[in-house]
Amino acid sequence: MGKDGLPSKPIFLLLLVFLPGNTSPTAEPQYMVLLPFLIHTDSPEKVCVQLTHLNESVTLSATLEYQGENRSLIDDVVSEKDVFTCIPFSLPKSNSTSVAFLTVMVKGATLQFRSRKTLLVKNSESLVFVQTDKPIYKPGQTVLFRIVSLDKDFYPLNEKFPFVYVQVSG
Ligand SMILES: *[C@@H]1O[C@H](CO)[C@@H](O)[C@H](O)[C@H]1NC(C)=O
Ligand SMILES: *[C@@H]1O[C@H](CO)[C@@H](O)[C@H](O)[C@H]1NC(C)=O
Ligand SMILES: *[C@@H]1O[C@H](CO)[C@@H](O)[C@H](O)[C@H]1NC(C)=O
């Protein structure tokens, strides 16, 4: 898990787009979309959008296309001149490594910006540790145990285990 407000993955794809016609002395509207290139499933991810020098109110929308479904991440009217916003999202496990598409759109009366990016989606691999309170049990003793699930960077995962079987041997 990342610290609050900070992206948890170091790999970022930076996309900087300027509107054409940069001739006037006043600052032109600028758009920047920051998103991880590689997404891990079941883990908190975020896409960040920075808009600067806006000269009119715009609608900011972001749509995530994954496994044949479109999910709206944000659809907001922005009336400030400068905005920096991060939108959290998380993708469910897929059967294989796959891709998702993220489309960010900014639309106003005169301004228009659209960016569509491909994201690689990788299933998060977890390491599961099961620990019991004793190495050997006598008949009738209660078995106490805990299960810890960590991601590949050894950060705890919020994984649910619906069933745990205890097998008696020996
Ligand atoms: C905002 O800025 C853009 C680009 O400089 C310009 O084309 C547009 O006319 C401006 N809109 C308004 C409402 O001033
Ligand atoms: C998702 O959005 C894309 C682009 O807007 C569109 O081409 C596609 O048909 C949509 N898919 C679904 C399942 O709505
Ligand atoms: C993924 O695999 C499960 C079980 O193996 C199957 O039920 C499901 O339809 C598959 N989903 C996709 C998107 O292929």
Image: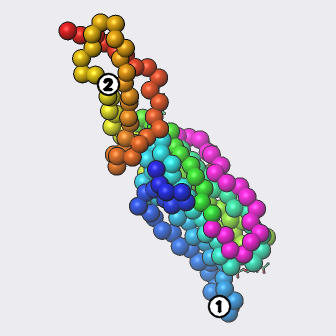
Whether tag 1 and tag 2 are in contact, CB under 8 A, the answer is no
Type of residue at label 2? Thr
The mark that comes first in sequence, 1 or 2, is 1
Q: Is residue 43 found left or right of 128 in the rendered image?
A: right
* Residue 132, quarter of picture: top left
Q: Which amino acid does the dot numbered 1 rest on?
A: Thr
Which residue shows up at 51% across the image and 61% down it? 6
Task: Say which of 133 and 79 sits in front.
Answer: 133
Q: Is the magenta stretch mostly helix, strand or loop?
A: strand
Give x and y (percent) for residue 79. 77, 69
Callout 2 environment at 10 Å: few (<14), some (14 to 19), or many (20+)? few
The residue at the point 62 percent across, 45 percent down is 70
Residue 130: image quadrant is top left
* 15 up-or-down from 168: above or below: below
Q: What residue appears at the point 42 percent right and 54 percent down from the top-left corner?
A: 38
Residue at the spot 65% in from the left edge and 62% down from the top edge: 105
Within-10-Å neighbours for mark 1: few <14, some 14–19, many 20+: few
Residue holding disc 1: 23
Q: Position of residue 152 (x, y in %)?
A: 33, 46
The foreground one among 81 and 138 is: 138
The residue tagged 2 is 132
Q: Position of residue 108 (x, y in %)?
A: 76, 68
Residue sitting farthest toward the bottom? 25
Magenta stretch: residue 8 in it?
no
Residue 69 is covered by the magenta coloring: yes
Q: What stretch is highlighted in magenta?
A: 67-84
In terms of secondary structure, where does tag 2 sit?
Answer: strand
